[in-house]
Amino acid sequence: MPDLAERECVPCRGGVPPLKGDQINEFSAQLDGWQCVNEHHLQKAYPFKDFREALDFVNRIGELAGSAGTSS
């Protein structure tokens, strides 16, 4: 299985079964600090020292998400 960090996010289009059991465990080993909850979704806590630091983080994530899949 390819390294998770090298894969590109592709929106779900249906017809593809979700990962289960050993498949989830294999990818989970590559996710530092993340947890798979009920073989359904991922969860991770990000502690910040103050509101400004949290807001900066959210804005950086928003920029990355907005540019994902674009060719600019």
Image: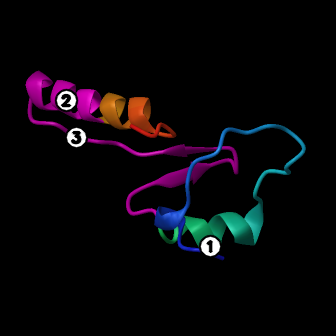
Reading the image, the residue beneath label 1 is 26
Amino acid of disc 3: Pro
Q: Nearer the viewer, residue 69 or 13?
A: 69
Asked which secondary structure carries label 1, the reply is helix
Reading the image, the residue beneath label 2 is 54
Q: Nearer the viewer, mark 1 or mark 3?
A: 1
Q: Give the range drawn in magenta.
A: 31-60
Place of residue 34 in the rendered image (x, y in percent of width and height, measured from the top left)? 45, 54
**Quarter of the image with the N terminus in it:** bottom right
Tell me which residue sits at (19%, 29%) in the image.
Answer: 54
35 lies left or right of 48: right
The image's mark for residue 12 is none
Measured Cα–Cα span from mark 2 to mark 3: 8 Å
The image's mark for residue 47 is 3
Tell me which residue sits at (69%, 44%) in the image.
Answer: 40
Amino acid of disc 2: Ala
Tell me which residue sits at (60%, 74%) in the image.
Answer: 2
Q: Nearer the viewer, residue 34 or 16?
A: 16
49 lies left or right of 15: left
Q: Does the magenta stretch include residue 50?
A: yes
Residue 33, quarter of picture: bottom left
46, above or below 58, in the image: below
Measured Cα–Cα span from mark 1 to mark 3: 26 Å
Asked which secondary structure carries label 2, the reply is helix
Measured Cα–Cα span from mark 1 to mark 2: 30 Å
| Farthest front residue in view | 72
Q: Which of 61 and 25 is in front in this view?
A: 61
Earlier along the polypeptide chain: callout 2 or callout 3?
Answer: 3
